[in-house]
Image (cartoon, helix red, strand yellow):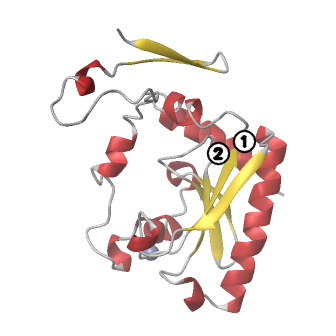
Amino acid sequence: MPYRTPVRGVALLTVSTMEASHQDGIGGPDGLERLWTPYRMAYIRGENKPGDDSAGECPFCRISQDRDDERFLVVHRGETAYAVLNLYPYAAGHLMVCPYRHVADYVETTDEEAAEIAAMTKTAVRTLRSVSRAEGFNLGMNQGAAGGAGIAAHLHQHVVPRWVGDTNFLPVIGHTKALPELLRDTRRLLAEAWP
Ligand SMILES: [Zn+2]
């Protein structure tokens, strides 16, 4: 029987472990609940993934050169860095702060770039706090493919707002046909609130 996982009364997901439990060699069910996040498949399949590490293939460079902030979900542009919504967010309002320059390694940033990335990260936290009442944050860079960077060739700092109990339902309810609209709305809210 599929079972339902209520998360703070918001997301009701029907998941089933029956299929898995009937496969040979995987042992019995472990009693852990499983939440499926099929929207991540677009990411796993590599859609929008650059073909190589060059600036010409780099989505962050494309965003930095184009001025269509709404289309590319850019929230703020600074002198050497910009803040953009993640198209595959871990949470609503998941921002990334990137240098305009195609640089992979944090230690290769100029002092100006590093200072602006730091300042912009602070502003992103303040803005997300005021707009979405985020209760916590995950801040950081995954550097290199071994460090878990999705696009390793162009440095980006993640700013992920968090709420107590958000881990299950926020990424899941974000996966709907309405997601592009939702992201556009989120972008507008953050861009308007950005000081
Ligand atoms: Zn780049």
From the image, tell me which residue sits under label 2. Answer: 93
Seen from this angle, which residue lies furthest top?
1
- Residue 183, image x, y percentages: 56, 40
Q: Quadrant of residue 122?
A: bottom right
Q: How dense is the environment of label 2, judged by Cα within 10 Å: few (below 14), some, or many (20 and up)? A: many
Q: Secondary structure at mark 1?
A: helix
Disc marking residue 156: none
User: On screen, 181 above or below 190?
Assistant: above
For this rendering, which residue is in front, 163 or 5? 5
In the depicted structure, whether residue 51 falls above or below residue 162? below
Q: Do labels 1 and 2 touch, CB within 8 Å?
A: no
Q: Give the residue number, with chain letter if any, for mark 1.
A: 189
Using the image as rendered, state which of residue 192 and residue 101 is in the foreground: 101
Pick out the residue farthest to the left.
24
Image coordinates of residue 27 in percent, x first then y, are 26, 33
Residue type at mark 2: give it.
Gly
> In the rendered image, which quarter is residue 138 located in?
bottom right
